[in-house]
Image: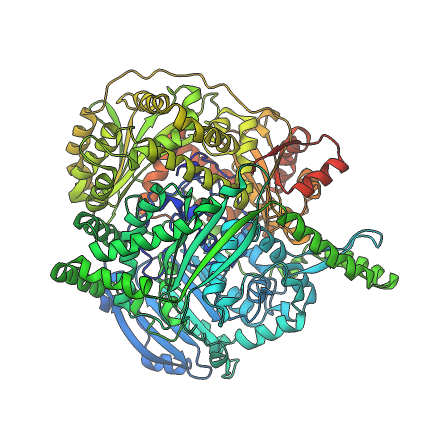
Amino acid sequence: MMEGATLLRSSLACNRLFFSFRSARRLSGFALPSSRSSSSSSASAIRNHRHRRILNPSRRSPLRRSSRLLPSSAPNSTRRSFSSLAPRAIATPFTQSPSEFSGVEDEVVEKLGFEKVSEEFIGECKSKALLFRHKKTGAQVISVSNDDENKVFGIVFRTPPNDSTGIPHILEHSVLCGSRKYPLKEPFVELLKGSLNTFLNAFTYPDRTCYPVASTNTKDFYNLVDVYLDAVFFPKCVEDFRTFQQEGWHYELNDPSEDISYKGVVFNEMKGVYSQPDNILGRASQQALFPDNTYGVDSGGDPKVIPKLTFEEFKEFHRKYYHPSNARIWFYGDDDPTERLRILSEYLDMFDASSSPNESRIQAQKLFSEPIRISEKYPAGEGGDLRKKNMVCLNWLLSDKPLDLETELTLGFLDHLMLGTPASPLRKILLESGLGEAIVGGGVEDELLQPQFSIGLKGVSEDDIQKVEEVVVSTLKKLAEEGFDTDAVEASMNTIEFSLRENNTGSFPRGLSLMLRSMGKWIYDMDPFEPLKYEKPLLALKARIEAEGSKAVFSPLIEKFILNNRHRVVVEMQPDPEKASRDEEAEKQILEKVKAGMTEEDLAELARATQELRLRQETPDPPEALRSVPSLSLQDIPKEPTRVPTEVGDINGVKVLQHDLFTNDVLYTEVVFNMSSLKQELLPLVPLFCQSLLEMGTKDLSFVQLNQLIGRKTGGISVYPMTSSVRGKEDPCSHIIVRGKAMAGRADDLFHLFNCVLQEVQFTDQQRFKQFVSQSKARMENRLRGSGHGIAAARMDAKLNVAGWISEQMGGVSYLEFLQALEDKVDQDWDGISSSLEEIRKSLLSRNGCIVNMTAEGKNLTNSEKFVSKFLDLLPNSPVTTSTWNARLPSSNEAIVIPTQVNYVGKAANVYDTGYQLNGSAYVISKYICNTWLWDRVRVSGGAYGGFCDFDSHSGVFSFLSYRDPNLFKTLGVYDGTGDFLRQLDMDDETLTKSIIGTIGDVDSYQLPDAKGYSSLLRHLLGVTEEERQRRREEILSTSVKDFKEFAEAIDAVKNKGVVVAVASPDDVEAAHKEQNNFFEVKKAL
């Protein structure tokens, strides 16, 4: 459960610990909060839209989506989200009444070419919402006005594919590669370099494509809007075959004597997707559930099918669907609603109406008369007992048409009751059955036209597949017959209601969360405001449960939609150690056949075209093209960082940090314990210790009762380790953080439950602990395949500093090896493990070295102090001793071999060892390296899905990383060329200013109040003062070209002394050995 918590990395490109702290969270539809620790290993986890920043949302997202990858920072997936029980922050105060939100005069609406369709005040988000229709084209526009400064724009097109060539996905990448007004290679990257955006991305769903942006700066916001509107309506890619080749696919041939290969950003991205068993399972399930409509193909693209896509089909798809008549446009925030329509009218008026809305309409899948069963293979390593590596998932299509809002909400509630927490019966019984290692399937998923329900297990013995199906069906029958425990219903209701009212979307803009929620109906020509209004259906549901009882509400749904539903698909997945090499061989044979069919002239022409494309990719845009992208000036940038009100005091001798911020009556609290007294050999047990605290029982409460009590009284509690180097110190900062939130009136309950979790939980349940080990092992294996860059980063850190070594013991390959050994040890030496867990508790729990951090309104902070005092009185007052952790992994180059079709390549060194002294300019330089050198060479030219650099300014480790990369040594060559790139840099003032502004946009990232309080705590733990923050900001703002040249010396340390870790395919590692013998020590991880 806790692997992701163990690395607290700070990126040089956006080293936010000096400035802020970002969190990622996705809410959409009536997506209910979930604490499914299995989300990262479920089949639906692959359906997460793959943000360009590779975030790791705590809630499973119901859809597999694709998107571009932001190059600006190293992976963030190494930090665990706060509480996956509920979303993460809280509302800013709304001071205006509905009438005070400005509207648009009717005559102005008319003059700009629109008509008002409807108008509502939506109390749930304190917003005035208007739906307009553009009269000439029929384009639909929602304009939401409130006092949220984090403004959001999005334009969405229905884009149903009819094959798996990935055409919507490739187009989503390509339209952002230059347009009519912005004729450079990638305006998107220029916006990354020089914008204050709080969100900049694009997503491909199975049936729609979304282009959202957000910013708190109005001028910047309208710049972003204009670039995106021009990109979608007038892209250069429909006239430029080379963009199609670069982003989609092309044959690559460096020399006529060599082999031809496939290259393309989306092609390689999807090769990575199809290397992950959970992804293959998710796609197989969806396509089998929907064989007769657009969901029966892969909008992201199947690597075997992508090379069948032609440029003509690509152009026609844009012409057909990227039209105002087929568009839904969203504006949200505190900007002028008249200006929104004025901007839109300039674009929309250029078009006439088209028939695209009829052509793009999604057809419903008819329900089956009989269940079906399919069996597929997935690529597996040769290690371990493959007979126990099967996966099985039961899937139901719940209806042949969209559901009404009340049924949808009730189903979502039922989903949370059955699967939402570790104590939920379906989840608990499946995991306790011993038939598999971890849950797969995302439960109820309702963002497509028709809802579905999926559940199953991975790590299943081939003899037990039928038993898994029987357990699922018998448990559902029992739940339908007996209903749910009253406390469980109350806990779910509180969790859901807390989540909806808190409206915490982390760093994800609230307006975008609402847009995606609305779009789940709007895109299918239903009421776009209905999904935003949860109060009435929630009250109706509560009243119905009160009047009829929960059994009368939920049992008929289980029977109708699942048990008596014949539209059921069982998907079996079997491990195949030969599949990856067979797929590679099949691709090789196709390419050999292509080459055999070419004349010498053809081959010479292909080699010339390959060089021409590479030259274009690596040639910078001319200055006049770069100047076309609008940007801010330094005068638009605040000279001081955002300061969080912080009062440092003490209660009962314990340091207490208090942040007086408006939180809508929610109290956010962290209790921090020093981990430095822990014995070194106990470190790998810490993540499982954290999980045990929340998922084992006490003397008086079973773990189910404890879990329900947390759900009934709070908004969630989580426990996780945090480790970081501290600049200028040898010893790392290493803590356990207990994090929780509750309504301020329940502060007493929150601190009572903190005490209960920390001091009363008993480590006696051997079978549950064994489940934790199996689940953690399954998650780590999944992470190796899907987030190899994070694994490589952790491994390099472990070779370079103690904090990295600690983190890797709790969340890297070493942790996976520990888990593999621990599985047997649980049966052989449970008493020893149980006493080790007690020893960890005894080492950690002490008032000495403890810190309490609280964020809420002042009166609520004051009222909570007595409960803090009572909690602290109950803590032991034992002295804290310091253990010596002086360990690192050997500093040899390492190849971690897994069954995959793509690589994750890393190289790192400590630049402080060269004598480099930290300067704020380093943030600017690193961001520039990411967005130019690495973007152009690793991604655009090299064909990887992402390339980025990361600087942990606390340890001095500078890392290069690639993501879903077809190359290995070629990428290392790019990393080694970075110093020379900086030395030869010719940068004008405008480019430098853009780079500075973009960096400030990163460090000033938008935060909700809980994140502000948490950031302040982390700065306190790491010794980052307000004076240092101000100094770094001044250094950023005064960055010069000279700083870039000087930083080349520091970055040469990576070239000359760096360690290399690659998570890579067997074939590529073998080829690397032939090219450079003994370069890698090889470790087989799966």
Q: Up-down: is 475 above or below 787?
A: below
- The image's colouring method is rainbow
Question: Residue 854 placed where, x, y %?
Answer: 26, 37
Q: Please, which residue is most extreme toward the right here?
A: 600
Residue 761 placed where, x, y %?
25, 30
Image point (20%, 35%), residue name: 701
Pick the quarter of the image with the C terminus.
Answer: top right
Q: Is residue 847 above or below residue 499?
A: above
User: Where residue 527 sits: x, y (%)?
Assistant: 32, 73
Residue with the most extreme left position: 547
Residue found 56% across the figure and 41% down from its top: 789
Residue 1073 picture location, percent across and down: 73, 35
Residue 3 shown left or right of residue 907 in the figure: left
Question: Toward which corner of the image does residue 443 lie, by quadrant?
Answer: bottom left
**Residue 674 visible in the current orientation:** yes
Q: Can residue 60 be seen here?
A: no
Viewer-side residue, 1031 vs 248: 248
**Foreground of the two, 112 or 578:** 578
Q: On the picture, is 467 further left or further right than 922?
A: left
Quadrant where the N terminus is found in the figure: top left
| Foreground pick, 616 / 973 | 973
In this orientation, which residue lies closer to the viewer: 187 or 251?
A: 251
The image quadrant of residue 8 is top left
